[in-house]
Image (tube, rainbow, N blue to C red):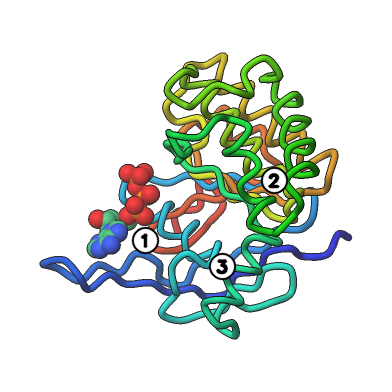
C-alpha cells in the first residue's frame, strides 16, 4: 500500500459573511495515497471549490483535521503553511490564474524561484516541463497570446514543475472543448502514474471523472460514493 499523501477527517466549514450563514462542509472525509487519482463531483454550490481550498491550506477549516505529506495545516503558522504548500502541493485553477504580463516560461518558473532555485536551473526545468505538455514552441508567449487549452496546459506545467506530492485541480478542463480537455486530463493522470503524484480533481464531467481511480460525490457537506444517497 502507498503512503497516504492527503488525509482529511470530519472537516467542517461554514461561511458567516453573507446575509445567511452557510454550512458548506459538514463532516467531509477522504484519504488519497501516492499515485492515486480522486475525482470529486457535486452540484453547483455544493462546496467543491471550498473543499479544495481547505484541503490545500488556502482557507481554514472550522473543525476537523487535514494532513498533507504528514503535517496538519492547523499545526502550522501562516509562513510554515506557505512553505509547505510550495514544497508539497501544486494547484490547477479553473481559470488558470497565470500572470498575464509574464511569458509561459516565467509563469512556470515562478514556483521554482519561490523555492529559491537558481534562475538557470529553474529555466531549464520549466522549459522541459513546457515541452512535456506540448508547448516547446510557445514558451516565450504571454497568456494573452495562447489559446484557452494552451493556457490551461501552462497552468498544469506550473503545478507539476516542482514534482509536488499532491496536485489539487479545480475544474481544470471546465472551460475547454472536449479534445483540449482530454489532453489536460491525460497530462494530470500521467503525472499521477509516472511520478506517484496524488491527484484530487473537481470536475462536472462524469466521463472524465470515471477515468480516475476513485470518484466521490460532494452532497450536503459530505463526500460519498456516487449513487449513495444516505
Ligand atoms: N467567501 C464566501 N462567503 C460566503 N459564502 C461563500 C463564500 N464562498 C463560497 N460561499 C458559498 O458556499 C457555497 C459553496 O461554494 P463553492 O464555490 O465551494 O461551490 P462549488 O461546488 O465549487 O460550486 P461551482 O460548481 O458552482 O463552482 C455556495 O453556496 C457559496 O455561495
Q: Which residue is mark 3?
A: 29
Of residues 153 and 108, which is closer to you in this image? Answer: 108
The number of discs equals: 3
How far, Cα to Cα, is label 1 from label 2? 23 Å
Left/right placement of residue 47 relative to residue 147 reads left
Q: Which residue is mark 1?
A: 220
How far, Cα to Cα, is label 2 from label 3? 16 Å
Find ligand 1 in the image and state its quadrant. bottom left
- The earlier-in-sequence mark between 1 and 2 is 2
- Residue at 44%, 74% in the rendered image: 60
Q: Which residue is mark 2?
A: 37
Quarter residue 201 falls in: top right
Of residues 44 and 155, which is closer to you in this image? Answer: 155
In terms of secondary structure, where does tag 2 sit?
Answer: strand
Of residues 150 and 136, which is closer to you in this image? Answer: 136
Crowding near the residue tagged with mark 2, few <14, some 14–19, many ≥20 C-alpha atoms within 10 Å: many
**Screen quadrant of the C terminus:** bottom left
Left/right placement of residue 133 relative to residue 60 reads right
Of residues 120 and 174, which is closer to you in this image? Answer: 120
Amino acid at each position: 500500500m502507498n503512503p497516504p499523501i492527503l488525509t482529511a477527517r470530519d472537516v467542517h466549514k461554514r461561511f458567516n459573511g453573507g446575509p445567511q450563514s452557510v454550512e458548506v462542509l459538514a463532516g467531509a472525509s477522504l484519504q488519497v495515497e501516492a499515485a492515486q487519482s480522486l475525482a470529486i463531483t457535486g452540484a453547483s454550490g455544493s462546496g467543491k471549490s471550498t473543499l479544495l481550498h481547505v484541503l490545500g491550506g488556502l482557507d481554514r477549516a472550522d473543525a476537523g483535521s487535514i494532513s498533507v505529506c504528514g503535517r496538519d495545516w492547523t499545526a502550522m503558522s501562516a509562513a510554515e503553511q506557505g512553505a509547505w504548500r510550495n514544497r508539497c502541493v501544486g494547484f490547477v485553477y479553473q481559470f488558470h490564474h497565470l500572470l498575464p504580463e509574464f511569458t509561459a516560461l516565467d509563469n512556470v518558473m515562478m514556483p521554482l524561484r519561490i523555492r529559491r532555485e537558481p534562475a538557470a536551473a529553474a529555466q531549464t526545468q520549466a522549459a522541459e516541463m513546457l515541452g512535456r505538455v506540448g508547448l516547446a514552441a510557445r514558451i516565450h508567449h504571454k497568456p494573452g497570446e495562447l489559446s484557452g487549452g494552451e493556457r490551461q496546459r501552462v497552468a498544469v506545467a506550473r503545478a507539476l514543475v516542482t514534482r509536488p506530492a499532491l496536485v489539487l485541480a479545480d475544474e481544470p478542463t471546465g472551460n475547454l472543448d472536449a479534445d483540449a480537455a482530454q489532453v489536460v486530463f491525460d497530462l494530470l493522470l500521467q503525472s499521477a502514474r509516472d511520478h506517484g503524484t496524488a491527484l484530487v480533481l473537481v470536475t462536472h464531467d462524469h466521463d472524465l471523472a470515471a477515468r480516475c481511480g476513485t470518484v466521490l460525490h460532494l452532497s450536503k457537506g459530505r463526500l460519498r460514493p456516487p449513487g449513495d444517497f444516505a
